[in-house]
Amino acid sequence: QQQVKQSPQSLIVQKGGISIINCAYENTAFDYFPWYQQFPGKGPALLIAIRPDVSEKKEGRFTISFNKSAKQFSLHIMDSQPGDSATYFCAASMNTGFQKLVFGTGTRLLVSP
Amino acid sequence: EAQVTQNPRYLITVTGKKLTVTCSQNMNHEYMSWYRQDPGLGLRQIYYSMNVEVTDKGDVPEGYKVSRKEKRNFPLILESPSPNQTSLYFCASSFGTGEGNEKLFFGSGTQLSVL
């Protein structure tokens, strides 16, 4: 079964620090790697996504780093804020099979004031 | 407002009593899908639909049924619920194929407890 392995399961970061969440995949046919953010009581929402033709994508304080050879990608949250406290899911799919989006197990981030 | 609407938000039922969770989207999306979220397991796909009358199994389809008779609606049916189907369920939709169209819009979830 295609898998995306996510770590850590939970993370506590001080306000202003850098939060880093890592994901690894096995299927080299994956070519779309989104990150979803979920607040308590809400559905996940797309945060940022990357394709393997670039090694990094930045949107505000959120950056995806992508290492194709290692089959790994990570989410970096710079200057973490208490409002970033949420569960984060990485995911992967093939462009020809976008409907089969595979999610990681999630990381619960707590940013302490 | 563009949204995916699920009902009910909370549901407690007993083993074997058929139930339906409704999902509706107002964005004219081609693609719709159901996920279940369990602690430590993340989001797992149950069923998806590429268009009206086109549905297919995801990773955990056992014990579930779906239908797509209209583009906007994609109900999830549990014919004979069992306790292992106690979970948080999410419906999601997107425009579908093509770069930039993969973004999933999720509903607010349905917390189901099967006693």
Image (spheres, coloured by chain):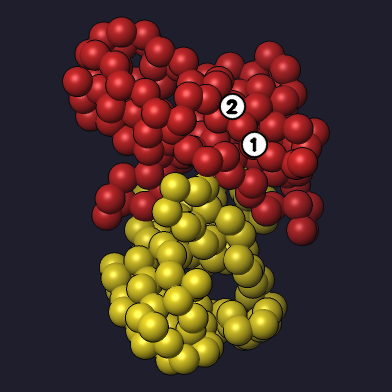
Chain colours: A yellow, B red
- Residue denoted by label 1: B4
Q: Is residue A86 found left or right of A98 in the rendered image?
A: left
Name the disc covering residue B23, or none.
2
For the residues bearing labels 2 and 1, Cβ distance under 8 angstroms = yes
**In terms of sequence position, does the residue under pointer 2 or pointer 1 come before the other?**
1
Q: Is residue B54 found left or right of A100 in the rendered image?
A: right
Picture coordinates of residue B115, whole percent (x, y) = 19, 20
Q: Is residue B82 among the parts visible in the rendering?
A: yes
Question: Could you classify mark 1 by the number of other residues whose Cα lies within 10 Å: few (under 14), some (14-19), or many (20 or more)?
Answer: many
Question: Could you classify mark 2 by the number of other residues whose Cα lies within 10 Å: few (under 14), some (14-19), or many (20 or more)?
Answer: many
Position of A27 relative to B49 (above/below): below
Picture coordinates of residue A32, whole percent (x, y) = 62, 63
Position of B12 relative to A90 (above/below): above
At a point 65% along the width and 27% down the height, the residue shown is: B24
Q: Which of the 4 image quadrants contains residue B30?
A: top right
Picture coordinates of residue B82, whole percent (x, y) = 24, 20
User: Of the residues shown, which amino acid type is indicated by label 2?
Assistant: Cys
Report the quarter where the N terminus of chain B lies: top right
